[in-house]
Amino acid sequence: MNALRGRRHETDLRTPTVATAARTADEQEESAHHGLVERLVDLGVRRASGADELVHELRREDPDLTPAALIQRLEKRYLRRASWLGAAVGSVATVPGVGTVSALGLTTVQTVAFLSTSARYVMAVASVHGVAPEDVERRRTLLLAALLGEEGAEAISGQLGLGTLYWAKAAFTKLPVGTVKAVNKALTRRLVKYGAARGGALALGRLAPFGLGVVIGYAGTRKIAKNVVEGTTDAFGPAPATFGGTS
């Protein structure tokens, strides 16, 4: 009996240790994912360029474009490019002798390319609305919120105490940098959980379902891109009646 009690006592002592170790491992994994997402988003934002030039170019090509029509054109252009990024990596898995493993090896590069394309789209829409975030932190906020779709807009509205989803023009350019950085950390945590709930996605440095074939890669990435479009709309609201700072 004493021996049995001793074994139970040992088990009771071990159980909290095992639970603590499990929590520590989970925290370390989440921290690693958090750092990876931060680096990928940072690369995407820094490599995105030419948003204002793109808006000017489209307006030169068609001077009669209204802001709403221009944003629609930007959206179609973005969805097409983002979708083919997914198809390009998906096609690698179909090549004999290459396969899925090699395709997944390309996904970090493609993730950065996707994020850069997404950031350029978001900044172009911001330009149409007359919003010009020059510092990297504010650009990062826009991209993170867009990647989260409606959830990103709701998170920012709740954190900043705004009464509207259309937060980008309401308070975005007036926020101090310290607040923007705090918002970015909160959005990154959400994005890690968002990615983990979808089989890894951005949290693991790859955009699922890259590497699983051309058709699936195209459709899957297009779905993620549509989420970005939704998040961008939630940030800025309907197109303005006239052009702001882009004339």
Image (cartoon, grey):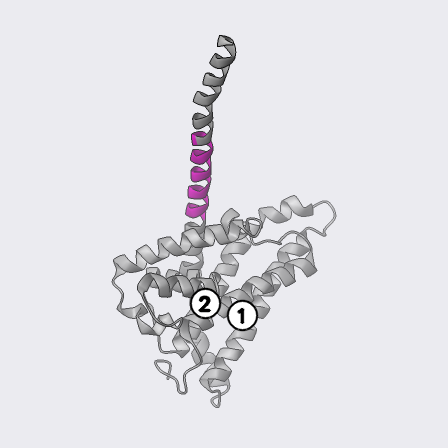
Identify the residue shown where x is 44% and y is 71%: 234
- Viewer-proximal residue among 102 and 138: 138
Q: Residue farthest to the top? A: 2
Left or right for 55, reference 103: left
Q: Amino acid at mark 1?
A: Tyr
Count of marks placed on residues: 2
Regarding residue 48, the answer to whether it shows in the image is no
Query: According to the image, label 2 marks what residue?
Result: 120
Q: Amino acid at mark 2?
A: Arg
Query: Is 22 within the magenta?
Result: yes
- Viewer-proximal residue among 157 and 185: 157
Kindly report the secondary structure that dominates the magenta region of the rendered protein.
Answer: helix
Q: Which label number is shown at residue 131?
A: none
- Residues in magenta, as a range: 20-36
Residue 81 at x, y percent in the picture: 57, 67
Identify the residue shown where x is 34% and y is 58%: 183
Separation of residues labelled 2 and 1 (CA atoms): 9 Å
Q: Which label number is shown at residue 78?
A: 1
Dot 1 surroundings within 10 Å: few (below 14), some, or many (20 or more)? many
Query: Is 51 within the magenta?
Result: no
Residue 242 at x, y percent in the picture: 39, 87
Relative to 61, is 7 above or below?
A: above
Regarding residue 27, the answer to whether it shows in the image is yes
SS of the residue at dot 1?
Answer: helix
Dot 2 surroundings within 10 Å: few (below 14), some, or many (20 or more)? many
Residue 100 at x, y percent in the picture: 67, 47
Left or right for 123, reference 83: left
- Viewer-proximal residue among 73 and 24: 24
Left or right for 160, reference 235: left
SS of the residue at dot 2?
Answer: helix
